[in-house]
Structures are given as structure tokens and as C-alpha cells.
Amino acid sequence: MLTVMGIAGSPRRNGNSTTLLRSVLKGAESKGARTEIVHLNDLVFKGCQGCKTCSPGGHCVVKDALTPLFAALKLADIWVLASPIYFDGLCGQIKQFFDRCHHFFYKDGKRGRQLMGKRRAAIIVTYEDKQREEYLVPAKALAFYLDWMGDFGDIKIIAESRLSKADAASKRPDLLEKTEKIGQQLVDEFR
């Protein structure tokens, strides 16, 4: 059975990016995938310490709440990362998490894609303002780094604007339908 890991970066458990993440996971479940969502804001973890000890072994030596999450992500077939855009960048929770993913850049003590084998990914970013190209930059950066970590294929970027209220996405059936279909597509493309 396919496993889809959803990583919610928002501090709001029912915020817009998390709502769209749940919709993607719902679509994946409808195609028979097993899904799990992790709310980074609920975890206690440190940011990257810049120690570079991940290079030789290909794993993060900092032991905290991210340790079991990294083990689960190694086994997951599909990753879905979600973050609101705050001050033109990713929220702090997803940034700190992703900095700690640096160890996935190393394989056998050398720089290389650790997460080989067929995988898929989607990145969700939501923001209050109108659609602006600058808001895609953080999502494209995440896609670039995912490509460094492994073979994620064509990474889907979902960028939704004009979501000014915390529950705005939940009141947009068009967005929920769109993201649910993306969840279905991720599973279909994997098979």
C-alpha cells in the first residue's frame, strides 16, 4: 500500500495550508493510499546545528521529535509539504524542519541523492495577498531541494492566494476539489 506523509508547517491546525493539505490527503486516500499528517508546531525540535556530522553517515545526529519523522519519511512514497507564506517566505516551522532534512543530501559519505526509487511530492503554499510570482519562490526552492534529496519526479506546486481569513480555504469548494484531485493524481502517477 502506498504511504503518503503530509507535513503541516502552519502553527494553525485548521489554517488554510493545512486545510488544503488535508484535502490532498483525502484524495490520496480515495485511491487507496495510507496517509498520515504531522503538525510540526506540535513537535519539540531544534533547527539545524550546522555541525556537518550528517555528511559521513547520511543521518541527522540531533535526536529529538524529528528523528522518528525522518525514519517515516524514508519509507514514504509521497511527501506533501504545506506552509503559509509569512513575510514573503515559508513559515518558521517548515523552514526549520527542512533545514534538518539536509542529511538526505548525503549517501555513502558523499553528496548524492539518498532517497532513490520512485517517489512523488507536492508543495502547498497559501497567502493572503493576490497572486504574485515572488510567493512561488519559496515553493520552488523546496522543490529544488527535494530534487537534490531523491527522485521525486514532477513535483506539484499548489500556490493559492487571497486567503486572508484563517478558514478561507475551507469555504472554497473549488480549492478543495482541486487539491483532492491532485491527491488522486499523485497516487495515479505513482502506480
Image: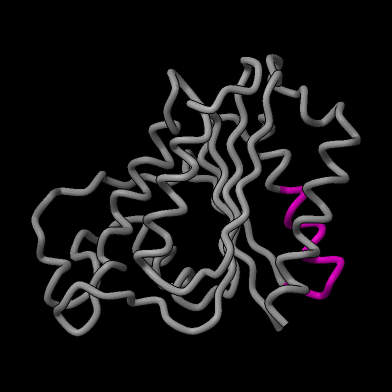
Q: Quadrant of the C terminus?
A: bottom right
Q: Main secondary structure of the magenta part?
A: helix
Residue 77, percent from left and from top = 58, 75
Residue 90, percent from left and from top = 44, 33
Residue 56, percent from left and from top = 12, 76
Q: Residue 26 lies in magenta, yes or no?
A: yes
- Name the residue nearer the viewer: 3 or 69: 3
Residue 41, percent from left and from top = 47, 38
Q: Residue 169 lies in magenta, yes or no?
A: no
The image quadrant of residue 20 is: top right
Q: Note whether 187 is above or below 131 in the view shown.
A: below
Task: Describe residue 169's horizontal placement relative to residue 172 as left or right.
Answer: left
Residue stretch rendered in magenta on the structure: 22-33
Residue under the point 47% across and 74% down? 151
Residue under the point 80% across and 64% down? 184
Q: Note whether 95 is above or below 50 in the view shown.
A: above
Residue under the point 38% across and 32% down? 92
Q: Note whether 182 is above or below 15 in the view shown.
A: below
Residue under the point 64% across and 36% down? 159
Query: What count of labels does the image hold?
Result: 0
Residue furthest out toward the right = 173
Task: Describe residue 85's horizontal placement relative to residue 29 as left or right.
Answer: left
